[in-house]
Amino acid sequence: SASGKQTYVNNAAVSGNSVSQARTGPTDAGNPAGRQYSVPATNTVTAAGATATKTVTPSKATIGDTVTYTAGAQVPAGINFYNLSIIDTLPNGIDATSVQQGTVTCTNADATTCSVTSATALSHTAGTGSRTVIGWLFGDVTQNPQARTIAISYSAKVADVAAATRSAVLSNAAHVVWDNAVMTAPTSAGATFQKTSTNATAAVTVTEPVLSIAKAGSAT
C-alpha cells in the first residue's frame, strides 16, 4: 500500500518500426530494415497525506485557568502512516509543565470506532521565542478501507508570565508528522520525520480584572 505524501513515478513508452514485421516483445526493435521510433511518457502521483485539526476550550481564560486542547489527525483511506504523531508548539504564556494528557479517540468515516486508542507522550523540547514543543506518538497507523480521525485531548494552565497579559492572544499550532516506512519510534517532540502536514491553530485570549479605586474626603 501507499504511504502518506509518498511520490510514485510511472514511466511508459510507445515504440514502432517503419517496416512491418512481427515483434516478439516490447523490447524487440522490429524489422532491421526499417527505422525504430519511440516516444516516452512519465506521470507522477503523490499519495494523500494526513490533515491536522485543533480546537481549544474555553477560548478565553485568566492566569491559572486550565484550558483543554483537542488535536486531531485526519487520515485518508488506503494509506499507511508510520510513526504517526501530533506535534504541538505551545506559546509562551501556556505552562508546558502543567500539560496533562486526556483521552484518545479514533473515529471512522461512518462514525464507528476504530482501533487507535492510545498515544505515547514525546519528551518536550525547546522551541523558538520561549515556546515549548510537545507531542504524542500514535505508532504505525496502517491502511484502512475508511478514512479515520484520530484525536487526543490535553489540558494546560495559563502561566503567570509577562506574555500572559489582558487581551493577549496565546496561539499555538499543531501539525501531523509521519514516516514513509517502518522506522525506529521517536521519543522526542523534536525528532525528525519524513513527512508533515500543514499547521492547525487554536488561540486563547487572556482575560484579567480591571481594578479601580475611588476615594472621597470631606473637610471637618
Image (cartoon, rainbow, N blue to C red):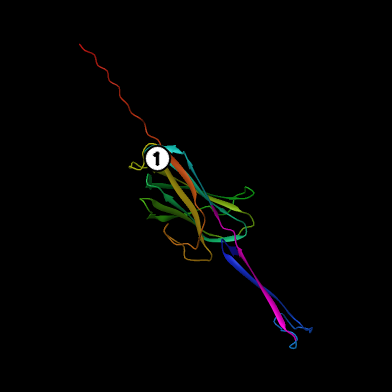
Left or right? Give the position of 73 relative to 132.
right
Instruction: State whether residue 103 appears in this view.
Output: no
Hey, which quadrant is residue 47 in on the image?
bottom right
Instruction: State which region is magenta.
Output: 34-51
- Near-viewer residue (35 or 134): 35
For residue 72, above or below residue 12: above
Left or right? Give the position of 78 relative to 215.
right
Residue type at mark 1 is Ala
Left or right? Give the position of 123 relative to 47.
left
Which residue is pictured at 49% across the width and 46% down the height?
Answer: 70
Let me know if residue 44 is in the magenta part: yes
Residue that protrudes farthest toward the bottom in the picture: 33
Q: Split into 4 quadrants, where in the image is the N terminus? A: bottom right
Which residue is pictured at 47% across the width and 45% down the height?
Answer: 202
Horizontal and vertical percent for residue 73?
Answer: 54, 52
What residue does disc 1 label? 168
Hey, which quadrant is residue 10 in on the image?
bottom right
For residue 218, above or below residue 200: above
Horizontal and vertical percent for residue 194?
Answer: 49, 63
Let me know if residue 57 is in the magenta part: no
Instruction: State whether residue 205 appears in this view.
Output: yes
Horizontal and vertical percent for residue 209?
Answer: 36, 31
| Magenta: main secondary structure | strand
- Dot 1, how many residues are within 10 Å of its Cα: few (below 14), some (14-19), or many (20+)? some
For residue 103, above or below residue 144: above
Q: Split into 4 quadrants, where in the image is the C terminus? A: top left
Horizontal and vertical percent for residue 39?
Answer: 68, 75
- Near-viewer residue (169 or 64): 169
Label 1 sits on a secondary structure element that is: loop
